[in-house]
């Protein structure tokens, strides 16, 4: 996973220091909410992303990425850079696929320039009653561009079913 998120070389287990941590409480903390200045652009980004999936618009799906973005899809090799993302996503996301999707995010981490989201996706294709379904987890690293918009810089998705 380190390579996908920008490490310049393989990171082996022996290179990662061991940290002895004890979790004393697993109750969700009250009062921790996403700030409105962060919620609005992430909501806009995710709405446009889901709309591109539902519309079968591979071009819009690709253009949600940074020019040097990387997508690690469910069943194939990682795709890196717009010259590879555009044809790949255009071949997967087509109107006739009749895809639908819903995203939910569990954790948000952010700095001024990046937002890291862990979340879940579910959806399907074709007829909602008789079509196929998919569901899994996703790790999204969004980067704030110079104009302030958020774009997907790295996305890893794994299918649960």
Image: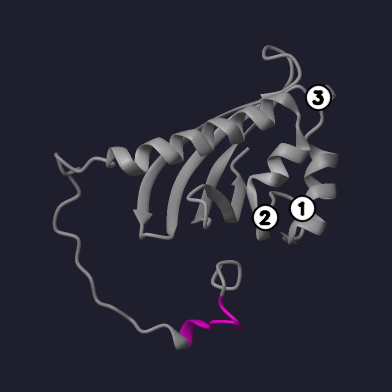
The residue where tag 1 is placed is 85
For marks 1 and 3, the one nearer the N-term is: 1
5 shown above or below 41: below
The structure residue drawn at horizontal position 64% and vertical position 51%, both measured from the top left corner, is 65
Which type of secondary structure does the marked residue at label 1 adopt?
Answer: helix
Q: Find residue 2 and report its image quarter.
A: bottom right
The structure residue drawn at horizontal position 29% and vertical position 41%, both measured from the top left corner, is 34
In the displayed structure, does residue 15 sit left or right of residue 156?
A: left
Instruction: Please state the horizontal and vertical placement of residue 80, each as a whole percent of the image.
Output: 73, 62
Q: Nearer the viewer, residue 137 or 55?
A: 55
Position of the N terminus, as image quadrant, is: bottom right
Q: Nearer the viewer, residue 149 or 156?
A: 149
Give the Cα distance between marks 3 and 2: 21 Å
* Residue 8 is a magenta residue: yes
SS assignment for the magenta stretch, majority: loop
The residue where tag 3 is placed is 95
Contact between labelled residues 1 and 2, with CB atoms less than 8 Å apart: yes
The residue where tag 2 is placed is 71
Looking at the rendered structure, which numbered label has been put on residue 7?
A: none
Give the Cα distance between marks 1 and 3: 18 Å
The structure residue drawn at horizontal position 46% and vertical position 87%, both measured from the top left corner, is 15
Determine crowd level at label 1: few under 14, some 14-19, many 20+ residues with C-alpha closer than 10 A: many
Which region is colored magenta?
7-14
The structure residue drawn at horizontal position 24% and vertical position 40%, both measured from the top left corner, is 33
Determine crowd level at label 2: few under 14, some 14-19, many 20+ residues with C-alpha closer than 10 A: many
Foreground: disc 2 or disc 1:
1
Instruction: Please state the horizontal and vertical placement of residue 69, each as a whole percent of the image.
Output: 65, 59
Determine crowd level at label 3: few under 14, some 14-19, many 20+ residues with C-alpha closer than 10 A: some
* Residue 94 is a magenta residue: no
């Amino acid at each position: 996973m380190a390579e996908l998120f920008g490490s310049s070389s393989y990171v082996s287990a022996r290179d990662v220091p061991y940290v002895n941590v004890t979790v004393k409480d697993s109750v969700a903390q009250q009062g921790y909410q996403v700030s409105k200045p962060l919620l609005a652009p992430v909501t806009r980004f995710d709405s446009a992303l889901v709309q591109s999936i539902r519309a079968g618009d591979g071009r819009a799906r690709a253009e949600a990425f940074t020019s040097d973005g990387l997508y690690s899809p469910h069943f194939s090799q990682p795709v890196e850079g717009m010259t590879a993302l555009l044809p790949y996503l255009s071949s997967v996301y087509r109107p006739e696929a009749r895809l639908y999707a819903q995203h939910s995010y569990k954790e948000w981490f952010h700095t001024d320039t990046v937002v890291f989201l862990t979340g879940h996706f579910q959806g399907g294709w074709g007829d909602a009653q008789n079509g196929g379904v998919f569901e899994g987890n996703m790790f999204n690293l969004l980067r704030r561009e110079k104009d302030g918009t958020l774009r997907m810089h790295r996305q890893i998705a794994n299918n649960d079913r």
